[in-house]
Image: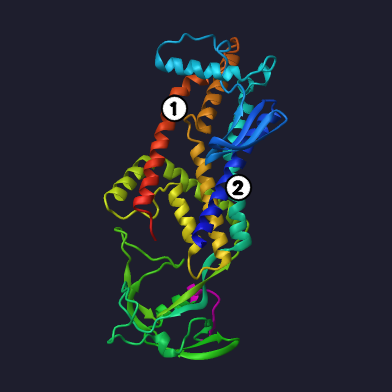
């Protein structure tokens, strides 16, 4: 049940994000006088619709997107000089122009999208992606400022009963294993370390750094247990363990393997706690996420190829690789059903997941290919350049950019994206990402 609830929460988050994306297109279009005939969330058969004013609002059966229908998206055949129809691709463009022209009612040519100035077209087409960016920033702000992010605390989550070699994954201690210093000192899960060797501590990094330096030395440790402070004597032992940097991250070599050294070891692990972050962190994290997403989009062909090879070749999926909505749903289900995770952390994780999806929608929609928003932005910019060039040279105002000529490309991109999505969905079903 918890798994299903996680998936349901994600579906609702995606639908709301799609709906707001389309609002980002619709509101400025109406503001600029363009008639918006339809606003729908989803594709396929209509489940519900209602007409308010001149716009039909509704929900369709397949929740994999949405659209707003702006009349006159493409210039009419007359506006672009009735170009001749020669060949298959030319016929597709002509049909797109004619279908767009049929939506323009008598006397409403001035309300067609193609009549807008270049800046207004850019505002309309960028309104959707920018809405996704704003959603991501708000969600990250709520997550990091209102809820917090998990950080290691000075409270103990577990105390190992024995000393095991680095990387040893046995759940029970071997008979010949030495007792861990933490267990020998009497530390228990739930204890909060107040001071170490007479020095007050307020972060796990402090505790870890001091333990690593004190191999073979007996030091007093004050812990708070059941509301009372208790002093214990702790003697870290020397053990081979991965090196960590100042931020507590494991140091790796050029091959990506953990660098180890002999350091003090106690056998305790910290519990996570949610720590609220400054408001500015939401903007910083949104910027970092956008940049990482942009790099992932640029590398998408290679990433998809590697994903297919690992998924259908029996290899292990890259945890940082590309996934489909099926994979995202699996992650949402795992968040919802994870054991030992508090409500706050579940909510924060789900909000981060939806924020990441919105950043992906923002970046992906800026790709300058139709039918994506970026393709229409590119067409509007090209039209603006032609108009400015003509103005500077004092030439007659050029005809509107014939964006319908991009329709064959749009069909090709649509097929490509659909095929890629299908392959990734199959990969997520056959060999899902784990860990």
Magenta region: 198-206
Left or right: 190 in relation to 33 = left
The quadrant the C terminus occupies is bottom left
188 vs 37, nearest the viewer = 37
Q: Considering only vertical position in the picture, is 149 above or below 378?
A: below
Residue 30 in sight? yes
> How far from the left and from the top, in percent, is residue 72?
60, 21
Numbered disc in front, either 2 or 1:
1
367 vs 111, nearest the viewer = 111
> For numbered disc 2, what is the local secondary structure?
helix
141 vs 208, nearest the viewer = 141
The numbered disc on residue 258 is none
Residue at 60% across / 86% down in the picture? 227
> How far from the left and from the top, in percent, is residue 229?
57, 89
Residue at 38% across / 37% down in the picture? 419
Q: Which residue is mark 1?
A: 411
> How far from the left and from the top, in percent, is residue 424?
38, 45
Q: Considering only vertical position in the picture, is 151 above or below 187?
A: above
Q: Considering only vertical position in the picture, is 255 above or below 113?
A: below
Say few, some or many: other residues with alpha carbon within 10 Å of mark 2 (under 14 / 14 to 19 / 20 or more). Answer: many
Residue at 44% across / 27% down in the picture? 411
> For numbered disc 1, what is the local secondary structure?
helix
How was this image coloured? Answer: rainbow
Instruction: Say whether residue 399 is magenta.
Output: no
Q: Which residue is mark 2?
A: 135
Q: CA distance from mark 2 to mark 1?
A: 29 Å
> How far from the left and from the top, in percent, is residue 269?
44, 76
């Amino acid at each position: 049940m918890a798994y299903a609830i996680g998936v349901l929460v994600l579906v609702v988050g995606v639908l709301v994000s799609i709906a707001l994306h389309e609002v980002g297109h619709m509101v400025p279009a109406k503001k600029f006088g363009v008639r918006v005939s339809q606003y729908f969330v989803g594709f396929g058969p209509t489940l519900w619709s209602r007409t308010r004013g001149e716009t039909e609002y509704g929900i369709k059966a397949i929740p994999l997107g949405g659209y707003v229908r702006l009349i006159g998206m493409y210039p009419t055949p007359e506006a672009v000089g009735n170009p001749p129809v020669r060949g298959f691709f030319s016929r597709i463009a002509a049909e797109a122009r004619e279908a767009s022209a049929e939506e323009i009612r008598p006397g409403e040519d001035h309300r067609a999208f193609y009549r807008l100035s270049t800046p207004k077209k850019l505002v309309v087409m960028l309104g959707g992606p920018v809405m996704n960016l704003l959603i991501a920033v708000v969600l990250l702000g709520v997550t990091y400022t209102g809820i917090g992010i998990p950080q290691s605390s000075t409270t103990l989550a577990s105390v190992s009963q024995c000393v095991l070699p680095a990387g040893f994954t046995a759940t029970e201690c071997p008979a010949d294993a030495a007792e861990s210093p933490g267990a020998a000192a009497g530390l228990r899960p739930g204890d909060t370390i107040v001071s170490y060797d007479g020095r007050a501590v307020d972060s796990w990094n402090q505790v870890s750094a001091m333990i690593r330096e004190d191999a073979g030395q007996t030091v007093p440790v004050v812990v708070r247990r059941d509301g009372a402070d208790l002093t214990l004597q702790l003697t870290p032992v020397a053990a081979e363990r991965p090196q960590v940097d100042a931020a507590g991250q494991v140091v790796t070599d050029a091959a990506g393997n953990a660098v180890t050294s002999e350091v003090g070891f106690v056998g305790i692990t910290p519990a996570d706690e949610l720590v609220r972050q400054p408001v500015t962190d939401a903007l910083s994290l949104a910027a970092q996420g956008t940049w990482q997403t942009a790099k992932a989009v640029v590398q998408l062909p290679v990433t998809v190829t590697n994903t297919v090879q690992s998924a259908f070749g029996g290899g292990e999926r890259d945890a940082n690789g590309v996934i489909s909505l099926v994979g995202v749903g699996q992650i949402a289900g795992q968040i919802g059903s994870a054991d030992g995770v508090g409500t706050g952390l579940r909510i924060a994780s789900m909000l981060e997941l939806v924020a990441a999806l919105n950043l992906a929608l923002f970046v992906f929609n800026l790709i300058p290919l139709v039918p994506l928003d970026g393709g229409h932005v590119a067409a509007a910019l090209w039209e603006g350049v032609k108009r400015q060039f003509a103005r500077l040279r004092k030439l007659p105002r050029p005809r509107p950019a014939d964006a319908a000529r991009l329709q064959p490309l749009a069909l090709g991109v649509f097929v490509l994206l659909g095929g890629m999505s299908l392959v990734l969905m199959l990969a997520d079903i056959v060999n899902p990402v784990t860990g």
